[in-house]
Amino acid sequence: QVQLVESGGGLVQAGGSLRLSCVVSRSIDSIRTMAWFRQAPGKQRELVATITSNAGAINYADSVKGRFTISRDNAQNTVYLQMNSLKPDDTAVYFCNAVPPIPGPNGDAYWGRGTQVTVSS
């Protein structure tokens, strides 16, 4: 069984910053692409940022480009998301996972509980 534990969320005013962390209970060294996703109330989960194993390729959703920075520490099995200049539209539960998501024994993907980010105007 694989666990993904996200942390670092909270309530912040617009323009503020947060740094999210995601610790994976297995080695991520062999996982080519790790990512952050988010899901706002009433909306589908969306991809926010991706990073390859050697950080050679990093991509962001247009909505967060220039404000968010994804990074990973393979030795610590941890993925980070630095979020600056936060906007109310960034309010969501944030999750990390591999791309494609890490599969469980029955085929369903493992997901963590996520971390809530709330940005007030």
Image (tube, grey):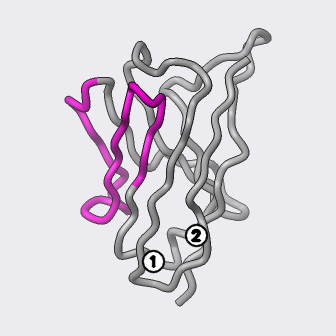
Residue at the outermost bottom position:
121
| Towards the viewer: 53 or 57 | 53
Residue at the outermost top position:
105
| Position of 41 relative to 56 (above/below) | below
Q: Amino acid at mark 2?
A: Thr
Left or right relative to 35: residue 61? left
Q: In which quadrant is the N terminus drawn?
A: top right
| Towards the viewer: 45 or 58 | 58
**Is mark 2 in CB contact (under 8 Å) with mark 1?**
no
Disc 2, SS: loop
Residue at the (61%, 46%) spot, across then down:
6
Numbered range of the magenta stretch: 54-81
| Position of 96 relative to 55 (above/below) | below
How would you rate the neighbour count of disc 1 (Cα within 10 Å): few for under 14, some for 14-19, many for 20 or more?
Answer: many
Q: CA distance from mark 2 to mark 1?
A: 8 Å
Query: In the image, residue 94 lies at what x, y percent?
Result: 58, 53
Q: Amino acid at mark 1?
A: Lys
Q: Which residue is mark 2?
A: 91
Residue 8 shown in magenta: no
Residue at the (40%, 63%) spot, across then down:
83
Q: Which residue is mark 1?
A: 87
